[in-house]
Structure formats: C-alpha cells, structure tokens
Image (cartoon, rainbow, N blue to C red):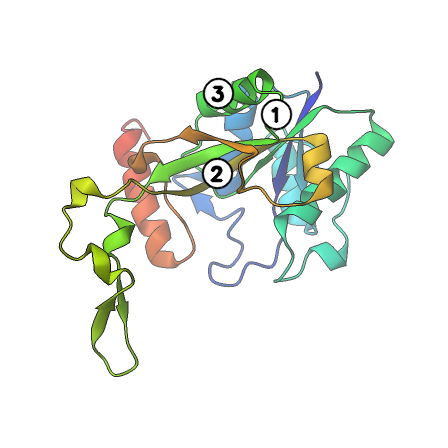
C-alpha cells in the first residue's frame, strides 16, 4: 500500500491574512500539520498543494514537498477541497506512480495528533466497504434543543417537541473535526462526498478540536495549545 498526505494551503485567506504560514505558538501554522504527518510514519510522501510560492517554500523548509503550483481554477475563494485533492492525486500518479490511499490534512490543524492519523488508516484498512475515515467530535450541548433567532427578535426551538425532554434522553450528535480525511484513491477521484454511510469516524476529545477562522479563534487556539503543551 502506498499512501500520500496532501495538505491544501492556498495563499488567499481573507479573514486571517496569510493564515497558513502565520506564526502559531512560535512556528508557521502549516508546520504543525506537516510534523503530525511526519511523526505518524505512515506516509510515503507529504505533498503541499498551494498556489503561493512563499507557502511552498515554508512547506519545503518544514520537510514537506511542494512539487507543483496549484492551478488558478482551484485556488479561488470558492474552491472546494475534493477537486484540490483529486488534482494532487492525478499529479502524483502521473509523476511518481500509483497510490492506494490519500489523506487530506488541513494546514490549520495544530491539534492534530499522529496517533489519530494512524488510527484513521487502520480502520480504513480493516473495512473493505469503507471509503473514508475522518475525525469527529461531540457537540458540547444537545443540538436537538437548539434555538433559532426569529426575524422579530424572539427565539424559537428548531425542534419544539424536544423542549420538555431531558438532555440525557436525546441522542448524542457529532461534527467534523476539520483536521484530516483519509480516503481510498478511487473515492477521492469520484468526488461523491465524504459524509455518508461509507465513512468511518475517529472520535476525538472536544479539547483537541478548534476551528480557527477568526482572530478570536486564533487567540483561543493558542491559549489552549499552550495549556495542552505546557513546554511551549
């Protein structure tokens, strides 16, 4: 089995400029994803897909490869992840040879642990009917008691029938951790979607999952990261 890590990292981030290489706890953000991939020791190659030469050079300095420039049609604000991964797979197979599985690793996943990458590959190998495996974590509050804000300024429940139910009587719900997505090569190339019965979850603790989309997210993530990794 030949496996490749593919890290999408375009240069045009808007809400946090230069997000993918902005220093996070003393190192370029992307370096944490590269290190997790390296430490997992399950990849034959670690490829960064970017349209930005500065990002490409930072990736190389961290020990990854950036062997091609991502085309403009896959680098805009509305570019989707699956076509980016498919493009990288096609490039790799045309230039390096066939692969069996690929793992999309987001460049902004400093909490990613090598053992979770290994776990994702292991469950994918064990289940022949599975196409993807990725990290999920549980919601902190029962989503079936979620509220919505109405146009007149009042509130209402999305599911009013659950108002009088106890939290412990409602089913737990999970969300995508936004860290990594293992997939068989064919599944990535078909691009039929990841969140389906063909996917397997790797359940992660909530403290190891943090979206980083705003400056406030960034500050909170650094504080949490330093708390977890007290030596940094």
Which residue in the protein does label 2 denote? 179
Query: Which residue is painted at 83% across and 24% down in the image?
Result: 97
Residue 196: % across, % down = 54, 40
Which residue in the protein does label 3 denote? 119
- Residue at far front of view: 161
- Residue at far bottom of view: 152
The image quadrant that residue 150 belongs to is bottom left
Rendered position, 114 above or below 25:
above
Earlier along the polypeptide chain: callout 2 or callout 3?
3
Query: Label 1: few (<14), some or many (≥20) within 10 Å?
Result: few
> Are dots 2 and 3 in contact, CB under 8 Å?
no
Query: Label 2: few (<14), some or many (≥20) within 10 Å?
Result: many
Which residue in the protein does label 1 denote? 129
Query: Which residue is painted at 71% across and 31% down in the image?
Result: 185
Label 3, secondary structure: give it.
helix
Label 2, secondary structure: give it.
strand
Rendered position, 155 above or below 185:
below
> Are dots 1 and 2 in contact, CB under 8 Å?
no
| Horizontal side, residue 53 vs residue 36: left or right | right
The C terminus is located in which quarter? top left
Query: Label 3: few (<14), some or many (≥20) within 10 Å?
Result: some
Residue in front for this viewpoint, 117 or 142: 142
| Horizontal side, residue 206 vs residue 211: left or right | left
Residue in front for this viewpoint, 194 or 104: 194
Front of the two marks 3 and 1: 1
Query: Which residue is painted at 70% across and 48% down in the image?
Result: 83
- Residue at far right of view: 94
């Amino acid at each position: 089995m030949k496996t490749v890590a593919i890290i999408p990292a375009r240069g045009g981030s808007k809400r946090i400029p230069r997000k993918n290489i902005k220093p996070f706890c003393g190192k370029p953000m992307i370096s944490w994803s590269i290190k997790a991939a390296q430490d997992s020791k399950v990849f034959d190659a670690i490829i960064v897909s970017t349209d930005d030469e500065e990002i490409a050079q930072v990736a190389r300095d961290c020990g990854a490869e950036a062997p091609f420039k991502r085309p403009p049609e896959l680098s805009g604000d509305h570019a989707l992840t699956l076509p980016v991964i498919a493009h990288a797979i096609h490039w790799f197979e045309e230039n390096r040879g066939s692969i069996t599985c690929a793992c999309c690793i987001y460049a902004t996943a400093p909490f990613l642990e090598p053992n979770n990458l290994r776990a994702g590959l292991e469950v994918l190998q064990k289940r022949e009917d599975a196409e993807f495996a990725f990290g999920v974590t549980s919601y902190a509050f029962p989503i079936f008691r979620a509220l919505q804000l109405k146009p007149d300024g009042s509130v209402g429940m999305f599911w009013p029938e659950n108002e009088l139910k106890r939290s412990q009587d409602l089913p737990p719900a999970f969300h995508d951790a936004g860290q990594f997505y293992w997939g068989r090569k064919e599944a990535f190339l078909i691009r039929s979607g990841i969140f389906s019965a063909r996917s397997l979850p790797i359940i992660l603790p909530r403290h190891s999952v943090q979206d980083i989309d705003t400056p406030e997210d960034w500050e909170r993530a650094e504080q949490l990261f330093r708390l977890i990794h007290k030596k940094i």
